[in-house]
Amino acid sequence: MSKARIILEDGTVYEGKSFGYEKSVSGEVVFNTAMTGYPESLTDPSYVGQILVMTYPLVGNYGVPERTRMPNGLSRYMESEKIHVEGLVVFDHSPGHSHWNAIDSLDQWLKEERIPGVYDIDTRALTKLLREKGSMKGKLVIGEDDPQKIPFTDPNNINQVERVSCREVITYEGIPGNKKVVLPDCGVKHNIIRCLLKRGVTVIRVPWNFDFNTIEYDGVFVSNGPGDPTMCRPTVEYLKKALEGNKPVCGICMGNQLLGLAAGGKVYKMKYGHRGHNQPVRNTDTGMCYITSQNHGYALDTASLGEDWVPLYTNLNDGTNEGIRHRSKPFFTSQFHPEAASGPTDTVPIFDEFVELL
């Protein structure tokens, strides 16, 4: 254990202690308000390039599950094959753990994947600062490392989707699998694919810059992903082609933003984004309200959309867009994560709505 510091771009410094792998890193500092689900959050590709602050004070007490894969190659318990955050910041790191499915401690897992952690930080004070000033560039400085030699980095200036997308077409056979869903992979969480497979469809996972219009499919499902969606121009262009037809199209998280861009809309960077399990949204068609799992730093400006598109979901905390739908064609989205993993599963039926349209 060494001393550790969090240094923000505004000059604020928080001092704590290190755990996990000891190395200094930089990235965008963001916070997550979830009480559970750190294995899923750490392996969510949407966090690439970011230093994650957990507001819940006790982290690590239930350990880490085994990192096994299902026969189709998907992770059984995680959301990808590895940890994607640059670093982890918590108030109280639990060195001991107890859970029927745990095989390692959080500390050991971070060491194996060479990810630094910092604890004994007032994460509530840090979160209040990020809420007031917005997400900031920051760096974790471990031990006696010279902070001047660790430059601040902004992950949103890099095409992060290119980093996390698959490199080749991967097919997951469903049972019976007679319907084919093409999934542009912008950094897909594995539970999105699991949820589709559970509904009997075959999923064709393609790289973010692959023209999926060249293959046969019954519907398109656009994944979540990290960073600035405007950097995914190829994906947007291919979606524009898909929107000329009438086959069902659905998008989750970044998929909502990319579909909005394809429809002629605009996106903007949020002050500090939505990350957690407790975001309330309202379906504008039915008036039904849901508590949702979310992880995004950009939002779609619904006022920029044409008259063929209407808001489908709205965030009840700040009024930002949480999904859109086409007035006459089978196209719809959610900015939140209906697959959860982790978080509430109230909106899982969105997958049923999509599959029923195929």
Image: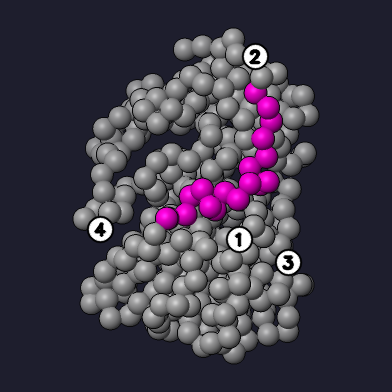
Q: CA distance from mark 3 to mark 2?
A: 41 Å
- From the viewer's perspective, is the residue at label 3 or at label 2 nearer? 2
- Tell me where residue 79 appears, x and y as whole percent: 40, 49
Amino acid type assigned to the residue bearing label 1 in the image = Cys
Disc 1 marks which residue?
A: 232
Q: Between disc 4 and disc 2, whose residue precedes?
A: 4
Badge 2: few (under 14), some or many (20 or more) residues near its Cα, within 10 Å?
few
Q: Is disc 2 placed on a helix, strand or loop?
A: loop
Disc 2 marks which residue?
A: 146
Amino acid type assigned to the residue bearing label 2 in the image = Asp
Residue stretch rendered in magenta on the structure: 150-167
> In the image, is 239 to the left or to the right of 304?
left
Whether residue 355 is visible: no
Q: Between disc 2 and disc 1, whose residue precedes?
A: 2
Q: Quadrant of residue 294?
A: bottom right
Which mark, by number, is residue 266? 3
Residue at the spot x=60%, y=61% of the render?
Answer: 232
Which mark, by number, is residue 72? 4
Closer-to-camera residue (325/210): 210
Residue 37 higher or lower than 26, as above or below: below
Q: Is disc 3 placed on a helix, strand or loop?
A: strand
Q: Between disc 4 and disc 1, whose residue precedes?
A: 4
Amino acid type assigned to the residue bearing label 4 in the image = Asn
